[in-house]
Image (cartoon, rainbow, N blue to C red):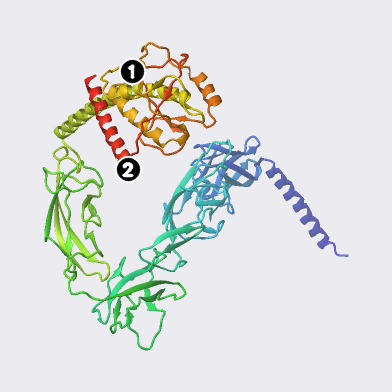
């Protein structure tokens, strides 16, 4: 049996054992951590890791990738430069190869891997300092219109965002998501551009942690006017309704002459037919057309300008109504309509004309709004412009109106007076006035120059000077004094007459108590009125008044019932003292009720009355009702014409009134 292969195997085995023994010995002379970590921005010669080695072991760096980053200080691996995470490739860590040697031992090679750790040492940054977004108006809320983000070299950092929008028109989807969304309804007519600021930071929004690094950028949002409105005829009044807006136009008016064809575009009010795109930011081209289509049209409209012209004369005097449609040429679905009303008038031979070709007026700058312009600086007479029309015999046309063609400083009333419409500085204002016939719009013009004087140099129209006001005050004072004198005289007369009428009333009551009753006058002492005829005594009642009343008494007695008439006596009238006490009217009233079946009504009147039951008597002296003597009233006899008696009574009353006035003046 051949044993040589076995010997070879044994020898090989022994060699392996020896080699493994030596390798284990080599491994034991030095060792180190397989991978080490160092933070970026380290200090120079900062220790990365330490090699463990036996005594007598020598260590040295044989190679490193990349070169020049590390070195050995004894058994310490140190960084000889500042490491930066942002230049470090995590997939390829730094490697350092270290060889350990010892006398009598195998050398050992260590491979050290160094990982650079990230530190928050860089701020975030936006790619641009300003961004621009275009957003359609009326965009639905919460719609995302853009995403703008920042970057941070510190790869481990998480960025948070905050958007500053002036009126809150936009916001962010989340503080960690910089997607910009619409928060308010956008209207191009109200806002056309919005400027915002977007902030980024590497700490959470609202946290208590101190913000270490931030960045910002500007965002400009242009609001785009979309095609959502039809054409608007001008002029018009804008009205908002929720998110919509319309513009109302009242139409156009004009005049054409019967059986006459106008040349050129028709003159309309408030102006020519014109429409604009309701979306002012778009300003799309507008076209015009008539909705009425006829085989033989009288009018035509320019498709581009809207001007209306005549193709032939109008043969009917009735008003003409035209319907005009304006539409967008690029989108005919956006359209609007209006009416043009033409009044057919008969032309006249002469237009209205101003009386003067030019006028000049004056007004103070402090006269105030709506003050009248005056004819001169020294007059308070307002300036008035007038016009005539030769088509009328007297030149007066009731259908003319005045207007100021250019300028808003002054206006003209329908009567032709010039008013200051607003405050005007001193100087001369030159205006052009127009007078026109409202029936056919025929007109003419005249110039007006208004000199506005500095304040205080001219009074306002209708005011008086200080001297004039003083004269008016003096006149009013004189009138007041005269009125007071007249009132005093009237009061004095009324006071005097009241005393006389009181006496007359007492006598009337007393007479009724004596003569009342159906049995006629009582027998006894009789009284007559003869004593009053020529008596000038001025006792309690003056003699002339008494004489007049006596005639009235006689007249009344003649009109009385026949059974009450008695024979007139010539007995003298007894005289009683004026100091006699006044009659007791209550006892007389009782006597009147008992003695007479018919009531006798005492009255004092200027007119004679024919009714039964009315009697009146006057006494020269007061009669004591307590006397036992009977008093009998004997009326005058004789018939007289009633009309004549009334005339005499009227004349007596006039004479009596005159005498009474004279006595009052003497008193």
Tell me: residue 565, above or below residue 628.
below
| Distance Cα–Cα, label 1 vs label 2 | 32 Å
Classify residue 211 as left or right of residue 487: right
The residue at the point 32 percent across, 43 percent down is: 643
Position of 268 relative to 201 (above/below): below
| Front residue (pair 400, 419) | 400
Reading the image, the residue beneath label 2 is 643
| Residue 266 on image: x %, y % | 28, 74
Q: Which of the pair 570/651 is nearer the observer?
A: 570
Farthest-out residue, right: 1
Nearest-to-viewer mark from 1 and 2: 2
Nearer the N terminus, badge 1 or badge 2?
1
Is there a contact, CB below 8 Å, between mark 1 and mark 2? no
Residue annotated with mark 1: 540
Residue 274 in view of the camera: no
Q: Quadrant of the C terminus?
A: top left
Report whether 16 appears left or right of 192: right
**Percent coordinates x, y for residue 432 in the rendering:** 17, 59
Determine which quarter of the picture holds residue 461: top left
Which one is in front, 415 or 569? 569
Secondary structure of residue under mark 2: helix
Circle 2 Cα neighbour tier, 10 Å, few/some/many (<14 / 14–19 / ≥20): few
Residue 223 visible in the displayed image: yes
């Amino acid at each position: 049996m051949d044993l040589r292969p076995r010997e070879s195997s044994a020898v090989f085995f022994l060699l392996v054992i020896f080699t493994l023994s030596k390798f284990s010995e080599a491994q034991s002379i030095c060792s180190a951590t397989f991978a080490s970590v160092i933070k970026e921005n380290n200090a120079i010669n900062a220790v990365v890791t330490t090699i463990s080695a036996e005594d007598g072991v020598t260590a040295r760096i044989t190679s490193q990738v990349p070169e020049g980053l590390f070195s050995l200080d004894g058994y310490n691996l140190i960084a000889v430069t500042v490491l930066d995470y942002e230049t470090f490739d995590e997939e390829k860590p730094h490697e350092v190869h270290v060889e350990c040697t010892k006398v009598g031992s195998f050398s050992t090679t260590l491979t050290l891997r160094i990982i650079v750790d990230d530190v928050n040492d860089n701020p975030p940054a936006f790619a641009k300092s300003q961004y621009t977004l275009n957003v359609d108006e009326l965009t639905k809320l919460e719609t995302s219109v853009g995403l703008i983000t920042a970057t941070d070299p510190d790869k481990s950092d998480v960025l948070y965002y905050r958007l500053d929008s002036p009126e809150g028109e936009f916001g962010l989807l989340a503080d960690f998501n910089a997607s910009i969304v619409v928060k308010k309804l956008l209207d191009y007519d109200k806002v056309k551009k919005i400027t915002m600021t977007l902030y980024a930071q590497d700490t959470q929004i609202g946290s208590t942690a101190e913000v270490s690094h931030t960045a910002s950028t500007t965002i400009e949002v242009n609001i785009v006017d979309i095609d959502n409105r039809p054409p608007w005829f001008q002029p018009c009044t804008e009205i908002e309704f929720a998110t919509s807006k319309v513009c109302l136009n009242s139409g156009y008016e004009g005049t054409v002459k019967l059986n006459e064809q106008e040349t050129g575009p028709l003159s309309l009010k408030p102006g020519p037919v014109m429409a604009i795109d309701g979306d002012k930011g778009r300003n799309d081209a507008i076209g015009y057309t008539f909705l009425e289509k006829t085989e033989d049209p009288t009018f035509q409209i320019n498709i581009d300008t809207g001007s209306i012209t005549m193709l032939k004369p109008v043969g009917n005097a009735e008003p003409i109504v035209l319907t005009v449609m304006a539409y967008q040429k690029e989108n005919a679905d956006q359209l609007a309509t209006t009416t043009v009303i033409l009044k057919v008038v008969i032309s006249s031979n002469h237009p209205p004309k101003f009386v003067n070709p030019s006028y000049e007026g004056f007004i103070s700058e402090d006269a105030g709004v709506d003050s009248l312009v005056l004819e001169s600086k020294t007059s308070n007479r307002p300036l008035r412009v007038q016009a005539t029309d030769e088509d009328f015999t007297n030149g007066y046309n009731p259908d003319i109106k005045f207007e100021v063609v250019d300028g808003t400083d002054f206006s003209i009333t329908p009567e032709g007076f010039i008013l200051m419409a607003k405050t005007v500085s001193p100087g001369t204002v030159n205006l052009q006035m127009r007078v026109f016939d409202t029936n056919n719009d025929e007109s003419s013009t005249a110039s007006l120059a208004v000199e506005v004087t500095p304040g205080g140099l001219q009074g306002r129209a209708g005011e008086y000077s200080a001297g004039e006001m003083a004269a008016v005050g003096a006149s009013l004072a004189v009138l007041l004094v005269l009125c007071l004198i007249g009132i005093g005289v009237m009061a004095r007369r009324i006071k005097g007459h009241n005393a006389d009428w009181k006496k007359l009333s007492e006598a009337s009551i007393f007479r009724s108590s004596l003569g009342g009753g159906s049995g006629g006058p009582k027998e006894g002492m009789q009284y007559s009125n003869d004593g009053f005829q020529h008596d000038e005594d001025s006792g309690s009642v003056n003699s002339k008044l008494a004489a007049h009343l006596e005639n009235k008494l006689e007249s009344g007695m003649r009109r009385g019932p026949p059974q009450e008439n008695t024979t007139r006596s010539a007995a003298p009238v007894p005289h009683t003292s004026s100091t006699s006490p006044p009659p007791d009217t209550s006892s007389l009233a009782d006597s009147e009720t008992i003695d007479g079946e018919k009531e006798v009504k005492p009255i004092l009147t200027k007119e004679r009355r024919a009714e039964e039951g009315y009697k009146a008597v006057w006494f020269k002296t007061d009669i004591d009702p307590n006397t036992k003597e009977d008093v009998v009233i004997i009326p005058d006899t004789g018939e007289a014409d009633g009309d004549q008696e009334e005339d005499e009574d009227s004349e007596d009353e006039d004479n009596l009134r005159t005498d009474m006035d004279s006595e009052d003046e003497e008193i």
